[in-house]
Image (cartoon, grey):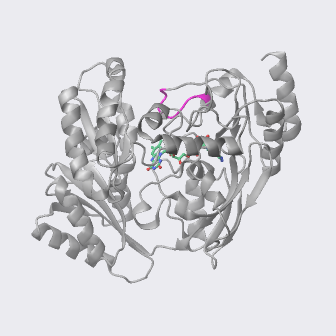
Amino acid sequence: MNAATDSFAARLAAIVGRAAVITERSALDPYETEWRGRYHGRARLVVRPASTEEVAAVVRLCAAENIAIVPQGGNTGLVEGQIPDESGEQVVLSLARMNRIRTIDPLDFTMTVEAGCVLRTIQEKADDADCFFPLSLGAEGSCQIGGNISTNAGGVGVLRYGSTRALVLGLEVVLPDGTIWDGLKSLGKDNTGYDLRQLFIGAEGTLGIVTAAVLKLFPKRQDVQTALVALADLETALPLLKRARAISSDRVSAFELLPRMGIEFATTYLPGVADPMVQPHAWYALMDLSTSRPGDSLRETMESLLADAIEAGEAVDAVISGSIEQQRALWRIREELPEAMRKSGAVLHHDVSVPTSDVATFIRRALAAVEAAHPGARCLPFGHLGDGNIHFSICPPVGADDDAFYQAEHRITPLVFDTAVDLRGSFSAEHGIGRLKLDELDRYKRPIDLDLMRRIKLALDPRNLMNPGKVVRVGNR
Ligand SMILES: Cc1cc2nc3c(=O)[nH]c(=O)nc-3n(C[C@H](O)[C@H](O)[C@H](O)COP(=O)(O)OP(=O)(O)OC[C@H]3O[C@@H](n4cnc5c(N)ncnc54)[C@H](O)[C@@H]3O)c2cc1C
């Protein structure tokens, strides 16, 4: 550590305490490396404030010193937004110590939480209050609500409850100059001009630091029925979803697509995972029906729905979970599939969306394009079919060299993105832009969109000190 960093660290320590400023190289490492281990930045130091006032004081000090800040939550983001650049100049501001549930109001169906609360803790606290918080994703044991808000996280409940944007009623944000913006309202309706909170949701830390939020809760779920359905074909997935929504009075709360290869990766790389069906099938849907009404006989609804779907030629087989353990086992296949692929070696992830009715067309076209360009590459299109959001992951051919595969990324990835964009889709449905997808943003966004984004960024952060080099390029970064 040089003398300048030393004196800066001492001034930060005066705000947050010595133990909350990390400067030792070995201790910085976890904050500099992202989940997949593909990218490693270099931080000047890490600061861990414990209150909104401390965050504001840290931001003011950094602004005075012209030092850029990278906000970091649970570090599960998949586009490198939470990792500093290689300069060794940027400060990582970790929200991990801001982890208090401030209030829960079960009559208002709201909960006020600090940004560093881990998503699973929020789900559990809502449950304790006889309520339900529907945001749910594979990283929920480590991602933080501040990170979820800043990425406008999606997950498996979007079909019924919307993405994070729909679940946030109010926000508290420290702006790039250190001002605290208190927008912690719990109003269902508030048409008093621009909806400022929406600016910060999905901004990936480029417009300010989210320090707290008012979240929307729902009645506690009394019954959840899960089924893994073997589809007759990819094209029968949507008719099955339509049928399920109609028969269940719109109580479908998740509808996820899995290809055969997904089951094979899960059974090969995840300990204790077995194929739930005797026969292999090309495509599966993992579906939840849920209700907040006691005695709703959802099991019978699920059984008759699946019987009808098989008779109509939409499905060919199904397994309904008989216990919470079986339910978890079925969901493990879906939720831990990214982990299974990671264990297998190289993998290229693409998180795209298309109009839901075009999902099958997108998958067929993208499969053909990748196979033609890279024969033998193993494609795993899976995920949130009900939202038109497919994670189109690609692993190298069996036995191929991982590094050589990564070198072909610039040829393979546009095949998937172009196919989605041709169908009026998006090249980033829920993971964001970060620094990983800046080139795609320049390529696929219209100039007018980029211009508006830059104008908003510069209006709030004229010196580009808040997570620079992420989401939108400004000046030379
Ligand atoms: C196994 C796995 C499954 C996943 N599944 C999904 C999924 O289904 N749907 C989905 O949308 N995502 C998914 N993700 C991606 C990731 O979990 C989400 O993006 C999550 O919302 C990030 O939260 P985090 O706390 O880890 O944020 P981080 O990774 O720490 O940060 C993400 C971004 O938000 C910014 N940020 C973090 N906290 C704050 C704050 N308090 N104020 C301002 N900016 C902040 C960071 O600077 C960065 O740009 C998955 C990731 C993994 C590893």
Task: Give the x, y percent position of residue 143.
Answer: 56, 47
Q: Quadrant of residue 291?
A: bottom left
- Taking the image as shown, residue 299 lies to the left or right of residue 83, namely left
Front-lying residue, 359 or 133: 359
Q: Looking at the magenta stretch, what is its main secondary structure?
A: loop
The residue located at (87%, 29%) in the rendering is: 10
The residue located at (22%, 59%) in the rendering is: 237
- Taking the image as shown, residue 123 lies to the left or right of residue 287, namely right
Q: Is residue 276 visible?
A: no
Q: Which residues are magenta?
A: 32-38
Ligand 1 placement by image quarter:
top right
Q: Quadrant of residue 245?
A: bottom left
Task: Give the x, y percent position of residue 384.
Answer: 35, 54
Q: Is residue 298 visible?
A: yes
Q: Is residue 443 magenta?
A: no
Task: Give the x, y percent position of residue 17.
Answer: 85, 38
Residue positioned most to the bottom: 295
| Number of marks | 0
